[in-house]
Amino acid sequence: MIAALLAERCTGCNACVEQCPTRVFEPGGPGGVPVIAAPDACQTCYLCELACPVDALWVNPDAHDATAPPLADLLASGQVGRVKRDHGWDAPLDAGQLDAYRLLGPLLGEGVEIADRHYHRLIAAR
Amino acid sequence: MSTAPLTLRADVLVIGGGMAAAWAALAAAEAGAAVIVVDKGAMGTSGVTATGGPGHWFVPPEGRAAALERQVARTQGLAEAAWMERVMDLTWRHLPTIAPWYPFGSDGQGGRYIQGVRGPEYMRALRRMCVGAGIAVLDHHPALELLADGDGAVVGARGLALGSGEDWEIRAGATILATGGCAFRSGLIGSHTQTGDGLLMAAEAGALLSGMEFSISWSLSPAWASTRTLPFTAARFFREDGSELAIPSLKAGHAHYQALGAALLQGTVLADLSAAPAGLPAVLRQIQPLTVAAFERRGIDLFRQRFPVRLFGEGTIRGTGGIALADADCGTGVPGLYAAGDAATRELVAGAISGGGAVNSAWALASGRIAGAAAAHYGAAKGGRAGPARALGKAGLRPRGSARPVATAPLQQTIEHAIHGLDRALWRRASTLAASLHELDEAWRAVADHGLAADPRGRVELRATAAMAATARWCTAAAAERRETRGIAVRTDLPATDPAQARRLLVGGLDKVWTRPAAPALRGLEAVL
Ligand SMILES: Cc1cc2nc3c(=O)[nH]c(=O)nc-3n(C[C@H](O)[C@H](O)[C@H](O)COP(=O)(O)OP(=O)(O)OC[C@H]3O[C@@H](n4cnc5c(N)ncnc54)[C@H](O)[C@@H]3O)c2cc1C
Ligand code: SF4
Ligand code: SF4
C-alpha cells in the first residue's frame, strides 16, 4: 500500500494524482504536495513510483500495510526510485531495457517442468 | 444526478482504459470518427494490462494452420475457427505498430521480440498513440450507466468525474464497453477498477452474457500481495514445521489448485523457490522489476528463503465469460452497443479454457479493433444525437424501495467468498452453488432495493458493488446450469464431460437470473471472412 510521500522532494507536479489508477491522491495539500486521500483504494501496483519524476513516493509491498520505515532507513534501503531504474522507465526506447523479456515464456515453462519432475519423484518416494 | 451535467458529443464513446479500449479507440479514430475514451482509472495505469505482461497470440501466417488446429482441439467445442483466424491476423498486423512508442527488446537473433510486452510500457505506448490520434482521453471519469433512445438503441453514457465530483453525460453514435473482466476485488494485481461495471451496464441495456461458468482461474502469489507469477512455477511447498506438501504441478490444471487450496484451508503454506530455473535469478529483475520489489522491500531473498503464499482469484479476468456477442462486429445485439476485451466473452477463441497466456490479449487487441471500426461506421451515421434519452441504470443508482446507506465492504466480502472462497470455487457442486446463489441474491437485493449514495466515490463504489453482485450471480447460475465438467468449469459432483453439452450457455436477467443454451454460430461471420 502507498506508504510514503517525501514532501521534501515533491515538486507538486501532480503526476501521481493524474496517473494513479484508483485516484488515491488528491491535489492541494500544504505546499502543493498531494494528499494521500484514499489509501484504502490503493492496489499496490507501484505505478505511481514510475509516474513520479523525482522519486518522492514509496509503496509498501504489503497490500494492507501503509507504514513506512523512518526516512533515513528508507533512503538507505536503496528502494526509493528503484523500480523506475529497474524498468529503464526514463531511458531511450532503444536502450535495451527489455532485452531479457523474451526469456519470460521459456523460463515459466522450464519452472513448470522442474516442478512436475519433482512432484513425480516425491510421490514415487512416498 | 445534479441538474446540469457536463455534456459532450462524439461519434464513438469508449468506456474503459486498458488495451482493448485503446485499440478500439485507435481503430475508430483511423476510420475517421471523433472518439472520447472515459476511464474509471487512468489510461496507462489502470486495468490488468498495465500491471501485467501480455504475451500475445502472435503467429506468422505460415504458422496459423497449425496454431488453429492446436487451439481448436484445446477449446472443447465452444470456440470458432473463423474468429481465431481473424484474431491472429489482426494481432500480427497491428501489434508491431506500437514500435515508435515502445522499447521492443531483442529476440536474441538480431531482430525484435514482439509478442510479449511489459504492461506499463505497453499502456504508456498505447496512451501516447491515442493522444497522438486526437482521441480525447478522460481519466478518472467512471461511467455509471448507459443512455438509450426510444427504440432502445444506446446513445451514450453518464458518469462522474472523480476529481471534481461532477456528473458528465456523453452522447455518442456508438458506445464500446471495454471495462475489463471482474476479479471481485480479490486483490489480484491490477484488478481494483475491474468490477464488472460494463457487464451490468450491458445487461441493463438488454445484452446477454455468455461463458460465465468459465470464471475460475488463480494467481499464486506471496500472501501479502498479488504479483505476477513467473518466479513461482517451479515452487515446492512446505508446512511451517518443514514437512513437504505433494502438490501436482501446474500441468495438472485444476488438481494443482485443488491440492494447494486443500493445504491452504488447513493452514499456512510456504513456497520454496530454491529449485527455480538456473537462469531465472539473474534476469528476473530485468523482466519483472515489480515482482522483485515485493520481496526485496520486505528483506526476503525469494530464491533462498521460504515465504507464505495465497491463491488470488481471477474471476472472469483469466476466466473466459463476459458480454455475449451477437455478430461479427463485436456488437452486443443492442443497437449502438459493442463490447471488447475481457468485458466480452472470450469463448469464441478460448472456448471452455482460460485465454490467459496468449489468446486473451490477442483477443483484446483484435476485438478492440473490430469493435472500434464497426462502431465508427455505425456511429458516424448516427452522430452524437441530442434527442431524448433514458438513463438505464438501476441497482446502486435508483433503489426500488426506500433509500438508505448500504455498507459496501461486507457485501463485497460476501460476493468475493461466494466466487473465490476456496471451499466453494475448487469443489463446485450443486449444494455449494445453491448456497452461493442464495447469498448473492441477498447481496443483490440489499443494493438494488435500498442502495443510494451521495458522495462521488460512494456512488462509484455502490455501483461497483451492484455490478460485482450481478456478475457473481451470472457466474454462479451458469456454473449450476452446466451439469458436467468442461475445461475450467469443473464440477466435483459431475466430473465427466457430456458431449451433449458441447454448446455455449447464455445467461441474463437482473432481478431474476436465467440461463439458456446459445445457438451454435454467430450471425454474419461467413460474410466477413
Ligand atoms: C497477472 C495477469 C497476467 C496475464 N498475462 C497474460 C498473457 O501473458 N497473455 C495473455 O494473452 N493474457 C494475459 N492476461 C490477460 C490479459 O492481460 C487481458 O486479457 C487483457 O489485458 C485485457 O485487456 P482489457 O483492456 O480488456 O482489460 P483491462 O486492461 O483490465 O482494462 C479495463 C479498463 O476498464 C476500466 N473500467 C472499468 N470499469 C469502468 C467504468 N465503469 N467506467 C470507465 N472505465 C472502466 C478500468 O479502469 C480499466 O482501465 C493476464 C492477466 C493477468 C491478470
Ligand atoms: S501503488 Fe498504485 S494504486 Fe497505490 S497509490 Fe500508487 S499508483 Fe495508486
Ligand atoms: S508525482 Fe512525485 S513530485 Fe509529482 S506531485 Fe506526486 S509525489 Fe510530488
Image (spheres, helix red, strand yellow):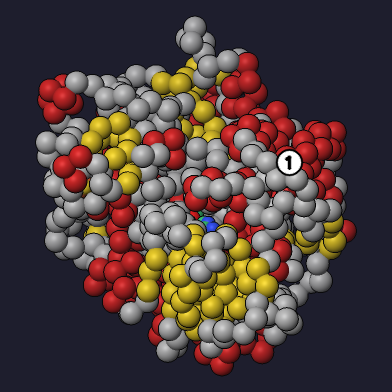
The residue furthest front is: B3
Q: Position of residue B80 (x, y in %)?
A: 67, 71
* Among the 4 quarters of the image, the one containing residue A76: top left
* Among the 4 quarters of the image, the one containing residue B289: top left
Q: Position of residue B290 (x, y in %)?
A: 31, 40
From the viewer's side, name the closer residue of B203 and A96.
B203
From the viewer's side, name the closer residue of A124 and B315.
B315
The residue furthest bottom is: B381
Image point (33%, 35%), residue name: A2
| One can see residue B107 in this view | no
From the viewer's side, name the closer residue of B91 and B151.
B151
Q: Chain of mark 1?
A: B
Q: Is mark 1 within 8 Å of ligand 1?
A: no
- Name above or below for residue A41 compared with residue A76: below
Circle 1: residue type: Ala
- Residue B232 located left or right of residue B121: right
Image point (23%, 21%), residue name: A69
- Name above or below for residue B297 compared with residue B208: above
Image point (85%, 61%), residue name: B516
- Residue A81 located left or right of residue B53: left
Q: Secondary structure at mark 1?
A: helix
- Name above or below for residue B114 compared with residue B164: below
Residue that badge 1 annotates:
B446
